[in-house]
Image (cartoon, helix red, strand yellow):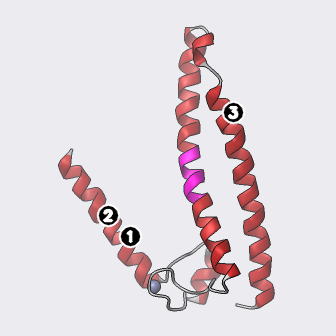
């Protein structure tokens, strides 16, 4: 990938990062508003809203971690290297998803591990 393209992406990811940070600040402010002060219907709605926000927050945190890792890699000039095996990530793959951290082989392995872990948890419950 050309340096100019990487630099363009870096700017884009930095902007995304800022947006997520702003959003999660707003969400934290919403979460601290006390549902106890409202009537029953409002309270129920507030709880639904809170769990929705918390779910969003969870997703945003993961995304933020992903973006921060990518920015770190760009700074180290390792943007195109797999986080696991340190081989080069397929250019097509990186072009399709700029936040990719792993090459296709490692990603498949990780997906498989994650599925196996989820399966194991199912048995436990
Ligand atoms: Zn790899």
Is ligand 1 within 8 Å of the beta carbon of the residue shown at mark 3?
no
Residue at horizontal 72%, vertical 67%? 13
Q: Disc 1 or 3, which lies upstream in sequence?
A: 3
Q: Which residue is mark 3?
A: 29
Q: Secondary structure at mark 2?
A: helix
Majority secondary structure of magenta residues? helix
Q: Where does ligand 1 appear, by image quarter?
A: bottom left
How far apart are the alpha carbons under marks 1 and 2? 6 Å
Q: Disc 3 or 2, which lies upstream in sequence?
A: 3
Residue 34 is inside the magenta segment: no
x and y, in percent, of residue 45 in the image: 57, 21
Residue at horizontal 61%, vertical 81%? 94
Quarter of the image where one finds residue 108: bottom left
The C terminus - image quarter: top left
72 up-or-down from 91: above or below:
above
Q: Residues within 10 Å of mark 2 (few under 14, many from 20)?
A: few
Q: Secondary structure at mark 1?
A: helix
- Does residue 81 show up? yes
Q: Which residues are magenta?
A: 57-63
Q: Which residue is mark 2?
A: 115
Q: Which mark is residue 102?
A: none
Q: Are marks 3 and 2 in contact (CB under 8 Å)?
A: no
Please tell me which residue lies in front, 95 or 51: 51
Q: Are marks 1 and 2 in contact (CB under 8 Å)?
A: yes
- Does residue 98 show up? no
The N terminus - image quarter: bottom right
x and y, in percent, of residue 22 in the image: 75, 47
Work out which residue is located at the far top of the displayed protein and give it: 39
Q: Which residue is mark 1?
A: 111
Is 124 placed left or right of 66 in the picture?
A: left
How far apart are the alpha carbons under marks 3 and 2? 35 Å
């Amino acid at each position: 990938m050309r340096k100019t393209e990487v630099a363009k992406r870096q700017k884009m990811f930095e902007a995304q990062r800022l947006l997520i940070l702003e959003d999660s600040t707003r969400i934290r402010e919403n979460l601290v508003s006390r549902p106890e002060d409202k009537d029953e219907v409002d309270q129920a709605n507030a709880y639904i809203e809170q769990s929705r926000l918390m779910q969003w927050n969870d997703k945003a945190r993961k995304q933020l971690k992903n973006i921060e890792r990518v920015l770190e890699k760009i700074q180290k000039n390792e943007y195109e290297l797999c986080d696991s095996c340190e081989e080069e990530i397929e250019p097509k793959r990186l072009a399709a998803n700029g936040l990719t951290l792993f090459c296709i082989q490692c990603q498949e392995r990780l997906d498989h591990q994650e599925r196996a872990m989820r399966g194991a948890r199912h048995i436990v419950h």
